[in-house]
Image (cartoon, helix red, strand yellow):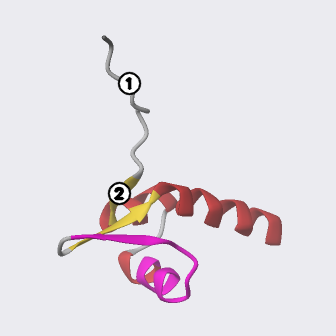
Amino acid sequence: MNAPRLSPDPICVRVNDAARIIGVGRTKLYELIAAGEIETVKLGKSTRITTASLHDLIRRQRGAG
């Protein structure tokens, strides 16, 4: 029996990685989180950013410009 094939793209990433992915600093990323623009998930003490919310942010910004 074959195991389900997982997507090569992560579902969520660390804060530093999320900032790098969208090309902003950590401070700006935390501002976006506080404004509700980016979705976070707490895993224990760690905060992760959903990659779907990063994609959504970029789509919204492209539409606004």
Percent across and percent down for residue 3 are 32, 21
In the rendered view, would you say 10 is above or below 2? below
Q: Which mark is residue 4?
A: 1
Q: Secondary structure at mark 2?
A: strand
Q: What's the residue at 58%, 78% (across, down)?
A: 37
State the quadrant of the C terminus: bottom right
Describe residue 36's horizontal placement relative to residue 28 as left or right: right
C-alpha distance separating marks 2 and 1: 21 Å
Residue density around tag 2, few if under 14, some if 14–19, many if 20 or more, within 10 Å: some
Residue 10 visible in the shown view:
yes
Magenta stretch: includes residue 14: no
Q: Residue furthest front?
A: 1
SS at circle 1: loop
Can you give x and y, in whole percent of width and height, for residue 29 in the image? 44, 77
Q: Is residue 27 left or right of residue 44?
A: right
| Residue located at (47% from left, 70% from top) | 24
Quadrant including the N terminus: top left
Pick whichever of labels 2 and 1 is earlier in the sequence.
1
The segment highlighted magenta reads 29-43
Label of residue 13 in the image = 2
Say which quarter of the image contains residue 20. bottom left
The answer to whether residue 65 is visible is: no
